[in-house]
Structure formats: structure tokens, C-alpha cells
Image: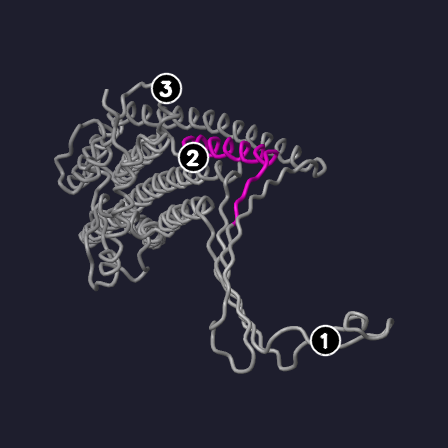
């Protein structure tokens, strides 16, 4: 369970030391270029969920200290002073002083000043819950460590997907801009042809209609890109006013290549290959899932904690043994106080053994409830393992589908671009029609969209695959084979 805790410790240190730097970065003016690696680092330093998980681990450290305080002695001191303005009076039988039987004689007891002070030390010699509580506190710390790792894995994955969503939104905007640019260029050329009497007014009107229909799509793409950037800023935990540009171009990414010749995509490729995926993987290793999945490791730690809780509840049937030591001073003085001028000291040592015999059926019910809760955790673990297997299989299928369609998408894009150039050349030479050029433009736009979406689907599926297998970049190291 604890074999990978050193891995997320680097994340913890990064969260502590990188946060001030990222806050300064968020206040900078101007536009910065943001790589995927930098976005992930900023998310680990600034995301509120990661910081809350880190606070939970710090809180668990304090709980460990509280648990250990139960085995230490409890030392207390007190001092008390009483000034008798009037000495208390008690009535004693008169015959004690030679008087008549049945009479009472008032007698004053006490002094003007009374002092008492000292120390009390209480030490628990045996208490079952205290002993179990020590190991329970350590196990609880492990639970919070695993939760911190699981949250960090989730945030890294969310950052990757949000980053890819910006790229696909940017690509959609670029495609819309390219389409409008092509339409405006064709419209300008056809207007000149119309003025020269080479085409009629209808050909010009067709392009004007297409251009008018395309401009609202451009506006939608612009707002879509703004939304994608806003979502990315939220995930990485930076203010909305912080302006940056993400690096990467989906249409230039070749998912079949081991590296990318485009430096703009080099960082994306590097992060993508941190946890390699083997094409046609169809066997899910349950042992690796149990070792790596953050949610399964958290439940596993919770099962250990529940075992400690059951043992602690059962220990309530055992006796409790305490020792108490008292060291006291007392003084009584008449008239004006002289502060312990006349004092006496006494000491006591006591042993207390407490054995609970019967408290109804509460303790038995507490044990049964804890055991039921443990069975519920076991079912959660089983459900989590089934969910993990399904997620790995689904992500693997999505990745395989991307690999199988990548080459066809790439060829279709090249053919569509070549077809558009030929259709435009035919039209310029009077051999083709405007309809052919329009159809070729639609095919180019569709091919570009299909390729960009294919790359986006691959990158998203790869991020989900890493999370499903429990080996997430910047959090875990790939196990050696």
C-alpha cells in the first residue's frame, strides 16, 4: 500500500513551494505561452481540491499527535486560598464542656487564612482503546495520503482533458476562419469574373449565402474557445484575468509516430508517452489495478482502518487500569496572611481498576455495526475493481479505434486538400463549376474536423486510460518490467 507514497511526496513538496511562484505568475500582465506540463504543474500547485487534500494530510498528522497524547501522563496543578472573614461556627453538646445536658455550645473552627495547593499526576496503565488508537491514527494518516494521491491523479487528468479541449476549440476556430477566408477569396474572384461576363450573378449569390451562413459559426467557435480557456483556468486554479495561450496543434499531431517533428507538440507527445500504451491490449491485470488505482488503494487503507476500529470497539470489554499520584501542601494562618509560613505536605498514590460488566447491548451492537460497515467497504472495493476493469477496457478500445482510424483520417485529409486544389484549378480554367469548388471546400473542412476530433479523442482516451490504470504522469512512475 505504501510503496508509492514517495512518488506523491514530490507532488506535496511542489504544492508547497510552487504555489507562491504560480500566484505571482497569475498576476503578470500580458500573454504567456502555456505548455501541457506547465499547466499540470500549476494545477498541482493551485487547484483547491489538491490543497484541501493536502490540508487533510496535515490534519491527520495532528490526529496522530492526539492519539499519542493518550499514553502520556496527565499532570495538573492547582492552588486555592480562602479568607474567612468570620470564622465558621459549629454547635457542640454542652456536656462536652461541663455544661447541662441538652444544651449546645457554639464553637469556632478554622483560621483566618487557608491555603492549599499541589500537583496531580494521572497515568493510564492499561486501556484497550488507547493502545489500538495509536495504530489507528497511523492508518488514518495512510488513508489521507492515499486520498491525496487519488485527488492529484484526478486533477492531472482533468487538466489534460481541459487542455485538449482548448486545443480542439482552437482548431475549430481556425477551421472556421480558414473556411471564411476561402469563401471570401472565391467571392472576390467570382465577382471579378462576373464583371468580366464569365459567370452569372447566381454564382456570386451562392458564395454570398455560404459566407453569411458561415459567419455565425465563426462567432460560436470564438465563444467556444473562450469557454474552453475558462474551464482550463478553473482546473489549474488561476484567476480568470490571467491571460495565456496554449501550445499545440491537433492537425499536426501524428498519433502513430513515437515523436513529433513539430516542436509545438513536443511537450504534448512527451506527457502522452509517460505511461506507454500497447496497441490491442485486451487483458486487464487485476493485481496492477489494486496496486495502482487511487480509489482502490484508498478503500484498501479504509479497510485497514475499519479493522482497527473493530478491534478498538472490542477492547471496550476489557478493564481499564489507572494510577493517580497527589502531592499537596496546605497551610492555616491567623490574622494577616504570611503565605505558607506554616504548612504541611502530604502525598497519595492510588490505583483504580474499572471493569465494565453490563451496559445493555450497546457494545455488542457497536461491534456488529462496525463489521457491517467493513462489509460495505468490501463491496465498494469490489465495485471499484469492476469499474476499473470497465474503464481500462473502454479506454483501450477508444485508443485502439483511434490507432485504426488514424491513417485513414490522415489520407482522407490529404486527398480532400488535393481535391480542393484540383476543383479550384478546373474552375479557374473554365472546366469546372462553382458547385464542384463548394463541394470540395466542404470535404476539406469535414476532413480537417474529422482528423482534429480523432486526435482529440485519442488524447482524451489516453488521459482516461492513465487514470484508469492508476499510473498518471507527474504523480506515478511507470513500473519497470
CA distance separating discs 1 and 2:
74 Å
Asked if the magenta segment contains residue 108, the reply would be no
Q: Residue at x 61, y 40 (%)?
A: 354
Residue 152 place in picture, x, y as percent: 34, 42
Taking the view exactly as shown, the residue that stands out farthest to the front is 98
Q: Which residue is mark 1?
A: 107
Element type at mark 3: loop
Q: Residues within 10 Å of mark 2 (few under 14, many from 20)?
A: many
Mark 1 or 2, which is nearer the eye? 1
* Magenta-highlighted residues: 296-324
- Give the residue at mark 2: 298
For mark 1, give the secondary structure: strand
Q: How many marks?
A: 3
- Structural crowding at the residue carrying mark 1, measured as other residues with C-alpha within 10 Å and reported as few (<14), some (14–19) or many (≥20): few
The CA span between labels 3 and 1 is 91 Å
Q: Quadrant of the C terminus?
A: top left
Quick one: 342 or 143, which is closer to the camera? 342
What residue is drawn where x is 45% and y is 44%?
71
Q: Is residue 303 magenta?
A: yes
Amino acid at each position: 500500500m505504501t510503496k508509492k507514497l514517495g512518488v506523491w511526496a514530490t507532488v506535496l513538496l511542489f504544492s508547497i513551494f510552487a504555489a507562491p511562484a504560480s500566484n505571482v505568475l497569475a498576476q503578470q500582465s500580458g500573454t504567456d505561452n502555456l505548455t501541457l506540463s506547465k499547466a499540470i504543474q500549476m494545477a498541482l500547485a493551485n487547484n483547491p481540491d489538491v490543497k484541501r487534500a493536502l490540508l487533510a494530510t496535515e490534519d491527520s498528522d495532528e490526529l496522530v499527535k492526539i492519539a499519542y497524547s493518550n499514553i502520556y501522563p496527565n499532570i495538573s496543578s492547582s492552588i486555592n486560598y480562602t479568607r474567612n472573614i468570620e470564622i465558621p461556627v459549629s454547635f457542640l453538646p454542652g456536656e462536652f464542656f461541663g455544661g447541662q445536658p441538652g444544651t449546645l455550645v457554639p464553637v469556632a473552627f478554622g483560621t483566618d487564612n487557608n491555603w492549599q495547593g499541589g500537583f496531580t499526576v494521572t497515568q493510564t496503565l492499561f486501556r484497550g482503546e488507547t493502545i489500538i488508537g495509536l495504530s489507528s491514527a497511523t492508518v488514518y494518516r495512510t488513508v489521507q495520503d492515499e486520498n491525496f494521491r487519488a485527488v492529484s491523479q484526478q486533477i492531472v487528468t482533468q487538466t489534460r482533458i481541459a487542455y485538449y479541449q482548448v486545443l480542439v476549440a482552437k482548431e475549430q476556430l481556425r477551421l472556421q476562419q480558414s473556411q471564411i477566408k476561402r469563401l471570401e477569396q472565391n467571392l472576390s474572384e467570382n465577382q471579378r469574373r462576373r464583371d468580366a461576363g464569365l459567370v452569372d450573378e447566381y454564382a456570386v449569390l451562392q458564395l454570398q449565402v455560404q459566407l453569411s451562413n458561415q459567419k455565425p459559426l465563426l462567432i460560436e467557435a470564438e465563444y467556444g474557445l473562450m469557454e474552453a480557456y475558462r474551464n482550463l483556468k478553473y482546473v489549474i486554479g488561476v484567476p480568470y484575468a490571467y491571460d495565456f495561450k496554449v501550445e499545440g496543434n491537433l492537425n499536426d499531431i501524428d498519433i502513430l509516430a513515437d515523436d513529433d517533428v513539430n516542436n509545438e507538440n513536443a511537450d504534448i507527445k512527451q506527457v502522452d508517452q509517460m505511461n506507454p500504451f500497447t496497441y490491442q491490449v485486451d487483458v486487464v491485470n487485476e493485481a496492477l489495478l489494486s496496486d495502482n488505482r487511487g480509489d482502490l488503494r484508498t478503500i484498501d487503507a479504509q479497510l485497514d482502518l475499519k479493522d482497527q476500529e473493530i478491534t478498538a470497539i472490542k477492547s471496550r470489554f476489557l478493564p481499564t487500569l489507572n494510577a493517580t499520584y497527589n502531592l499537596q501542601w496546605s497551610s492555616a494562618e491567623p490574622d494577616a496572611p504570611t503565605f505558607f509560613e506554616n504548612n504541611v505536605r502530604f502525598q497519595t498514590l492510588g490505583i483504580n481498576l474499572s471493569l465494565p460488566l453490563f451496559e445493555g447491548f450497546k457494545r455488542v451492537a457497536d461491534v456488529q455495526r462496525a463489521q457491517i460497515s467493513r462489509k460495505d467497504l468490501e463491496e465498494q472495493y469490489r465495485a471499484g475493481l469492476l469499474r476499473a476493469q470497465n474503464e481500462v477496457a473502454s479506454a483501450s478500445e477508444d485508443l485502439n479505434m483511434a490507432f485504426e482510424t488514424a491513417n485513414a483520417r490522415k489520407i482522407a485529409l490529404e486527398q480532400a486538400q488535393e481535391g480542393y486544389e484540383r476543383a479550384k484549378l478546373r474552375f479557374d480554367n473554365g472546366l469546372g463549376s462553382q458547385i464542384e469548388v463548394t463541394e470540395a471546400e466542404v470535404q476539406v473542412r469535414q476532413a480537417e474536423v474529422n482528423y482534429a476530433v480523432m486526435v482529440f479523442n485519442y488524447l482524451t482516451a489516453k488521459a482516461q486510460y492513465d487514470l484508469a490504470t492508476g499510473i498518471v504522469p507527474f504523480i506515478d512512475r511507470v513500473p519497470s518490467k
